[in-house]
Amino acid sequence: MDARTVDFAVAAFREEGRWSVSVLPARIATSCASLLGALRQLPGEGGVFGFVGVEDDFFVAVREAAGRTRGFISDAMAIEDWSLASELAEVLDLDVEDDELDEYLAIGDLSIFADFGLAASEVELVCEDPDLYPDEQVRSIAKRLGFEAELASALRGR
């Protein structure tokens, strides 16, 4: 995977009750290790969320909090084709069944936003909506979490 395949990479975190969103360099988002390393450098009440969209194909969402990594991949099939997805699956110790790789299903910890008011069932619905591109899915999640405007501003300025 190289930086040209990354559509967007952002970090979102709360400080003093307010959301901040920062664009991450695409080169950081090409490997799971560099993405997680960058997220660990940022502050955040309740941890830091990272979102990476790849080739209008899928996105990953990760959360670094208290030395623990949680996350999911919006489309399990990406594990077969994209190094970022396969690396994240390994880091998260996902047990991926072959039949899960034949369908458009989100895989991983869809409850990573639950303590911010977004249930796993809602995340699943967003990820499995065939009419939404990955950036639209992430915008939908951002809207529900309350940082849609910050995300839009960050992505406009990249």
Image: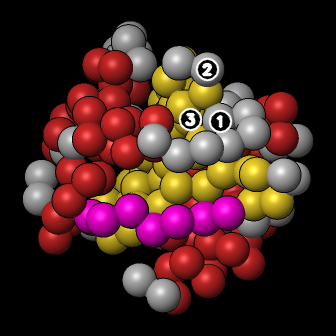
Q: What residue is pinned by disc 1?
A: 47
Image-based side of 120 in relation to 16, left or right? left
- Type of the residue with mark 3: Arg
Q: Mark 3 points at which residue?
A: 63
CB atoms of marks 1 and 3 within 8 Å: yes
Q: Is residue 24 magenta?
A: yes
Front residue (pair 95, 100): 95
Residue 135 appears anywhere in the view: yes
Marks 3 and 2 sit apart, C-alpha to C-alpha, by: 10 Å
Residue 31, position as x, y percentages in the image? 22, 42
Task: Classify 10 Å Cα crowding around label 3: few (below 14), some (14-19), many (20 and above).
Answer: many
Question: What amino acid type is highlighted by mark number 1?
Answer: Gly
Q: Give the range drawn in magenta.
A: 20-26
> What residue does disc 2 label?
66
Q: Is 99 rendered above or below residue 142?
A: above
Residue, x 74% and y 51% (percent of image)?
Answer: 14
| Label 1 element class | loop
Disc 2: CA contacts within 10 A as few (<14), some (14-19) or many (>=20): few
In terms of image quadrants, where is residue 44? top right
Q: Are the residues flagged by discs 2 and 1 in contact, CB closer than 8 Å?
A: yes
Which label's residue is closer to the chain start, 2 or 1? 1
